[in-house]
Amino acid sequence: MKTAREMMHAGASCVQETESLMDAARLMGELDVGALPICGPDDRLQGVIADRRLVGMISEADLARHLSEEQVGHFVESTCATR
């Protein structure tokens, strides 16, 4: 099975949290994408804007509740190694 990292599109663009909804919509159209991360001044994720109904998100806490300690440890190790 491929990992999320192997499947994701590299080079995502952010809309800044200070930009208007029109700016976000324009950027989504230019990039032909249905969702954009919303970033703060430090370029850290603040939220997501999407043109579809969000089904859900998975947090590390969710993983901890549903996976073994070994699986969660592997996930955390993998994500920290890629930063």
Image (tube, rainbow, N blue to C red):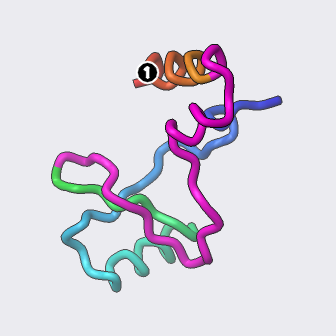
Q: Would you name the residue on which mark 1 appears? A: 80
In the image, residue 54 lies in the stretch drawn in magenta = yes
Residue shown at the point (51%, 44%) measured from the top left = 59
Residue that extends furthest to the bottom in the rendered view of this protein? 22
- The C terminus appears in which quarter of the rendering? top left
Residue shown at the point (43%, 63%) measured from the top left = 48
Residue shown at the point (55%, 78%) measured from the top left = 51
Residue type marked 1: Cys
The part of the image, by quadrant, that contains residue 70 is top right
**Residue segment shown in magenta:** 42-71
Closer to the camera in the image, 53 or 6 = 53
Image coords of residue 63 (percent x, y): 60, 36
Closer to the camera in the image, 54 or 61 = 61
Image coords of residue 36 (percent x, y): 46, 63
In the image, residue 12 lies in the stretch drawn in magenta = no
The part of the image, by quadrant, that contains residue 64 is top right
Image coords of residue 46 (percent x, y): 31, 57
Residue shown at the point (59%, 69%) measured from the top left = 54
- The N terminus appears in which quarter of the rendering? top right
